């Protein structure tokens, strides 16, 4: 049971980390996107929320590692979109 929890944590951490790096790289190497440092870290805030909300259970049907990973990617995309719009 503990190895499954570790796999779930690694999935969410990997997606949050990759999204954070993608936002930072796109901000650094493109002229259109310019994201400040704090908003760049927004996907990691989703990962921190995941870690601190998973204290024991019972968990709902939507409280899965996959959904937290998707939420992290969506937050990264919204961060990029907000920087392009403004």
Image (tube, helix red, strand yellow):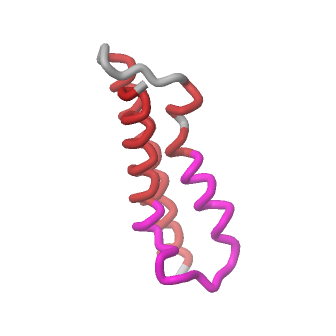
Q: Would residue 31 be found to the left or right of residue 38 on screen? A: left
| Residue ranking furthest to the bottom | 58
- x then y, percent, for residue 31: 31, 14
| Residue ranking furthest to the top | 31
44, above or below 51, in the image: above
Q: Quadrant of the image for the C terminus?
A: top left
Q: Would residue 57 be found to the left or right of residue 86 on screen? A: right
Residue drawn at x 36%, y 22% as measured from the top left: 33
- Residue 53 shown in magenta: yes
- x then y, percent, for residue 80: 39, 34
55, above or below 50, in the image: below
Residue drawn at x 55%, y 52% as measured from the top left: 46
12, above or below 37, in the image: below
- Residue 40 shown in magenta: no
Residue drawn at x 54%, y 32% as measured from the top left: 39
- x then y, percent, for residue 85: 38, 28
Magenta segment boundaries in residue numbering? 45-68
Q: Quadrant of residue 76?
A: top left
Q: Count the labels in the image.
A: 0
Q: Would residue 60 be found to the left or right of residue 78 on screen? A: right
Q: Nearer the viewer, residue 32 or 28?
A: 32
69, above or below 4, in the image: above
Q: Quadrant of residue 49?
A: bottom right
Residue drawn at x 58%, y 81% as measured from the top left: 59
């Amino acid at each position: 049971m503990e190895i499954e929890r570790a796999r779930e944590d690694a999935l969410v951490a990997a997606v949050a980390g990759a999204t954070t790096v993608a936002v930072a790289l796109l901000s650094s190497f493109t002229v259109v996107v310019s994201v400040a440092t704090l908003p760049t870290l927004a996907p990691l805030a989703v990962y921190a929320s995941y870690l601190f909300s998973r204290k024991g259970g019972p968990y709902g049907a939507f409280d899965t590692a996959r959904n937290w990973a998707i939420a992290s990617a969506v937050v990264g995309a919204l961060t990029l979109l907000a920087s392009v719009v403004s």
